Amino acid sequence: MAVPWSLISNTSTPDSHHSLFSSPSFSTSTFPKNHHGSHLFPTTTTRNFPKISTSVSGIWDAVTGGGGSSREALIAIRRGMVLFRQGDVSGSVSEFDNAIKLDPRQKAYLWQRGLSLYYLDRFEEGAEQFRIDVAQNPNDTEESIWCFLCEAQLYGASEARRRFLQVGRDPRPVMREAYNMFKDGGDPEKLVAAFSQGREGENFYASLYAGLYYESQNEADKAKVHLVASCQSPYGLRSDDYMASLAKVHCVCRKWEL
């Protein structure tokens, strides 16, 4: 399994497992290509990374058998995640790719890279990334869904559904329902309605995946309604969750006003 994000960062962390939930289309990125472009979101800058402690480095080395290159790879991943949150999607991929060069074992766990590749229209590479990740963690609902999202752009929704990655039962009701909707086809409006009175996080994820489902069906107007709603939800506005940042990146990529 991947080293938990709590071992990689000293900043506040989401309250769930290492998958996309804990962190998180048609045009290429509209963000700056360099790593020092304007920041779209007021998040931590690359200058403010907390250092990885010796104890954390030791844990990672014990898990991976690596040394300095493993620590440098973790730092590159952290830089990539911050760049993505800031809207520099191309820069984030450069950092994730650098992490793989430094420590090739990282590729099996780099779901963050798959998300960035989706927003650069690099769908085949994104699907490959998510398939590799699911092979390592066969219970990861969201990586299965994101593989579908990539392959829907490559082959169409029907073929992507035929190729759908089966994973274990997710403990989160909202993600179980989202998974079944993508796998079997369904009504995104029912997903949103089912969790409209639920916890803030459930409401956010229902809206996020309803919008993404509509995007996979090439229904951009309906996708916009739900993606914007996810950004404007209490969870989307306040949470440090990587996927809350992804929702904002998505809307900016599509040139949707928030």
Image (tube, rainbow, N blue to C red):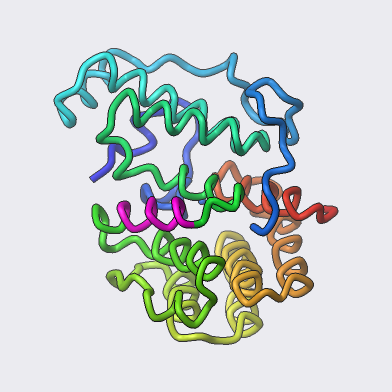
Asked if residue 161 lies in the magenta stretch, the reply is no
Q: Which portion, as a residue range, is magenta? A: 124-133
Q: Which SS does the magenta portion mostly show?
A: helix
Residue 6 versus residue 185 in the image, above or below:
above
Residue 147 versus residue 218 in the image, above or below:
above
Q: Identify which residue, 56 or 64, lies in the foreground.
A: 64
From the top left corner, tell me how far across and down residue 187 is, in percent.
60, 86
Q: Quadrant of the N terminus?
A: top left
Q: In the drawing, does residue 152 fall left or right of residue 62?
A: right
Question: Image quarter for residue 170?
Answer: bottom left
Question: Image quarter for residue 47?
Answer: top right
Query: Residue at left 74%, top 42%?
Result: 30
From the top left corner, tell me how far across and down residue 173 is, in percent.
44, 73
From the top left corner, tell me how far across and down residue 200 is, in percent.
61, 61
Q: Identify which residue, 203 or 87, lies in the foreground.
A: 87
Q: In the drawing, does residue 161 fall left or right of residue 68?
A: right
Query: Residue at left 76%, top 66%?
Result: 224
From the top left corner, tell me how far across and down residue 211 is, in percent.
66, 69
Q: Identify which residue, 206 or 249, lies in the foreground.
A: 249
- Taking the view exactly as shown, the residue that stands out farthest to the right is 257
Query: Residue at left 81%, top 52%?
Result: 255
Tell me how many marks there are: 0
Residue 54 versus residue 197 in the image, above or below:
above
Query: Residue at left 41%, top 51%?
Result: 16
Q: In the drawing, does residue 54 fall left or right of residue 46?
A: left
